[in-house]
Amino acid sequence: MQIAEQIVLVTGGARGLGRRIVEAFAAEGARVVINYRSSSTAAQELVSRFGPQRAVALPADVTDPGQVSAMLERTREHFGAPVTTVVNNALADFSFNGDARSGAAEIGWDEFTSQFSGSVRGALNTMQACLPGMQEQGFGRIVNIGTNLFQNPVVPYHDYTAAKAALLSLTRTLAKDLGQHNVTVNMVSGGLLRTTDASAATPEEVFDLIASSTPLGRVTTPEEFADTVLFFASPWARSVTGQNLVVDGGLVMG
């Protein structure tokens, strides 16, 4: 299925990286569902840009399966067809500032629970809600957002990295389970992006250090990252599933 034929749900799609992913899909002609939890104004601004035939903004806390199911029902009512493609981008409240994060000696399990709920439970809820529609159409694309901190844990984001690692495992087990339905499941893992709402608190010297450490000599932008998400949804990736592609300018290789 071409991107222009797809109905794409982007969780946390009203701002930051999610917004750039929404814009990338819309630019390719897809119809987009802009999920948000509290960013109503930003979500509606995107709908105004693309028009109601191409975009709809729907609130839902992805950690609540009931809210996710209701969002999918409203999507089908609005577009007359089910979601074909899901980008699990929603992130529990988090600031990418290593100096402000809890270290190993003081981090509490509640911090892990928050991240696991947002990353893993949220992705599980959207997948389960979207799967009947994907099976109905004989086509589905699930793209999960990960991190290069798996391979390069230079900052003590213990809770965030552990949750994303669990999401990578879920990505691969889902890929094995859902391939029979022509549903692919992949992950795109970035490093620090310049700039999103979450990375706005990152000191400038950190960006400069990362840029100097990459072969490309610069920090990846949200727009560049979004391009790779498009790849996994496109026909060019029709035989790719269960993969984790790192998009960070070559900072982490392998």
Image (cartoon, grey):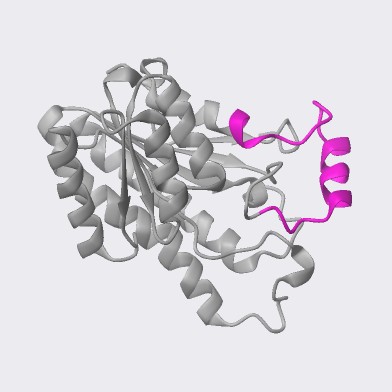
* 89 w.r.t. 47: above or below: below
Identify the residue at image location x=27%, y=18%: 1
Question: Which quadrant, please, contains the C terminus?
Answer: top right
In this orientation, which residue lies closer to the viewer: 213 or 63? 63
**Is any atom of residue 89 visible in this view?**
no
Q: Is residue 37 above or below residue 241?
A: below
**Position of residue 83 measured from the top left corner of the image (x, y, whole percent):** 23, 37
In the rendered structure, which segment of residues is drawn in magenta? 199-224
Residue 158 x/y as whole percent: 64, 67
Horizontal side of 141 relative to 245 (left or right) equals left
In the image: residue 84, left or right of residue 253 = left
Residue 10 position, x and y percent, is: 39, 42
Q: Is residue 181 visible?
A: yes
Q: Quadrant of residue 175?
A: top left
| Quarter of the image where one finds residue 225 | top right
Q: Is residue 101 magenta?
A: no
* Residue drawn at x 25%, y 42% as measured from the top left: 177
**Residue 221 in magenta?**
yes
Q: Residue at x 13, y 41 (%)?
A: 77
Q: Quadrant of residue 37?
A: bottom left
Q: Residue at x 36, y 49 (%)?
A: 35
Taking 123 as reference, is 150 left or right? right
